Image (tube, grey):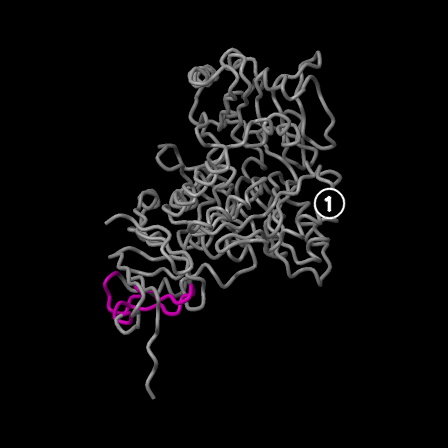
Amino acid sequence: MTTEPIRADLVVLGGRVRTGDAAADAAATGFGAANAPAAVAVRDGIIVAVGSRADAAGWDAAGGDTIDVGEATITAGFVDAHVHPLSGAESRHEALMLHGCTSVAEVAERIADFAATRGVDEWIRGFGLSFDLFVGEELTNAPFADAFGGRPGYLLLFDGHSVIASPRALELAGIDGPRDFGNNSSIEVYDDGTPTGYLIESDAELLVTDLYPRMPFAERVAAVRAKLAEFAATGYTSLHQMNMEEGDIEVLRAIEETGELATRVRISPLWRASDPWEETLERIVRLQGTGGRRWQVEGVKFMLDGSIDNGSAWLFEADTRGGGLEPYWSPTELFTRTIHTLAARGIQTATHAIGDRAVEFVLDAVASLPVDARGVTHRIEHVETIPDHLVPRFAELGVPASMQPIHAFCQRPDGLDMWTTLLGAGSERADNAWRVADLDAAGAIVALGSDWPVEEFDARHVFAAAVNRKRHGAGTPAVDEHQALAPERALAAITHHCWAAIDRPADGFVRVGAVADLAAFDLDPLTADAAEFAEASVRLTVLGGEVAHRAAP
């Protein structure tokens, strides 16, 4: 009996295939060995064969395409499990970037220089302002008021949960004193009740940021198309977008009218604590499954707490300024009810929980689900500090930990960063930071992300950060080296764990039957030095069997 040859519409040839199966990858022989897996066959967007170059010679790719990437290593396409590509493409377009500023005076100088290029009534937006410039100081707009020159504007702090608004922006927003938002959002004020310009959490922030005029639609479409191509050029094939802004669906549809998205985009709309419950539930349910060829609305995102740096993370014990004892979602009983309601409808959830108390609350909410509602995955995003007793519960409850170890670099070697200062330098909770390796060792599904535009998004840098716990190119010491992942675990966390976190555990591998999302790197992520891999050329990304990025020869 003759065996029918494997038919393919795409064959990718390389030096080695890293399948994502730990046993298979460990047993694989070196580059150039006759039996080494070095080729992948794809048909109709699905992997139909993985084998050696000799095997590939017998595959039938007539009428299809064969791409030879030389000695590059082929892996499953990388996934960013927590990112904001559409809103980031718009907000960071021609904006003032403040990352790397080392003093308040430098920030003011950059604002003034930027303002000099703008009209007298034009808005000025700055991003990435470090909290560390204000350790031991009050955050106000006073150091920057003159630099704005009477213009409306705001500076988004690094955490993405706080802004410093200019005096003119406060005036336009009608902010003249404190307000009760029913949660831990706040308008900070001086002793006399006048606003300082410091706004904490979205209910307060949006009063100002929503006044900024939106980018024209055509420009927004172009910016998103270009940004997704940048993601693909670093090795990403899929992005989990943790928000949905007005017009996002129209932008994605417009891109697909004239071409293809360079990456998959899975959108989970944000349900804020202040949103009307019945209306929001109806909207979330109605949106599920809306999509196109490479994008889909799936799941829902919650913000149970805020950030440690601005005092709005929900902690077991108060931070050093007395904050951190309230959740953002209030009342919390309503949060639990919402999780139960969505689980009963088969809708996946992802909850932002940074503080230890917030993380425990989400785990308790999942544990309280009835048995017949346990088939839906409920993720926790960020997980910046947790005590020992919470670590095993992630695996016990099947709750993925969607984490960004690249955020850990907010910690400074001298401990004088805001994150450490507010948790208490040398405290147990400060030492229990970003426990990626501990959660992975305990059997949890750890899914890696960047949280761009809060942090950089380069897939190679995110992978390297998980392995060496260093900010690429910064020349600074490793942060919490004991939480570093072995390369094979980091590869799992940035590929198939991200698929498992959305209830698709069979994908994110290079094996027969998996979706044909692939990346090819000049260096092998499992054997190369992490810092060197961070600069490796991305020869190819393949999305559903179609080329999304191909490096120039």
Residue 303 magenta? no
Q: Is residue 8 left or right of residue 429?
A: left
In the image, 391 versus 384, the foreground residue is 384
Q: What element does badge 1 sit on?
A: helix
In the image, 387 versus 346, the foreground residue is 346
The residue singled out by tag 1 in the image is: 279
Q: Is residue 64 left or right of residue 394?
A: left
Looking at the rendering, the stretch of residues picked out in magenta corresponds to 31-56
Q: Position of residue 158 (x, y in %)?
A: 51, 30
Q: Position of residue 222 (x, y in %)?
A: 43, 40
Relative vertical location of residue 197 with respect to residue 425 in this rendering, above or below? above
The image shows a total of numbered marks equal to 1
Relative vertical location of residue 486 with respect to residue 149 in this rendering, above or below? below
Q: Is residue 431 left or right of residue 53?
A: right
Q: Is residue 276 left or right of residue 164?
A: right
Q: Quadrant of residue 314?
A: top right
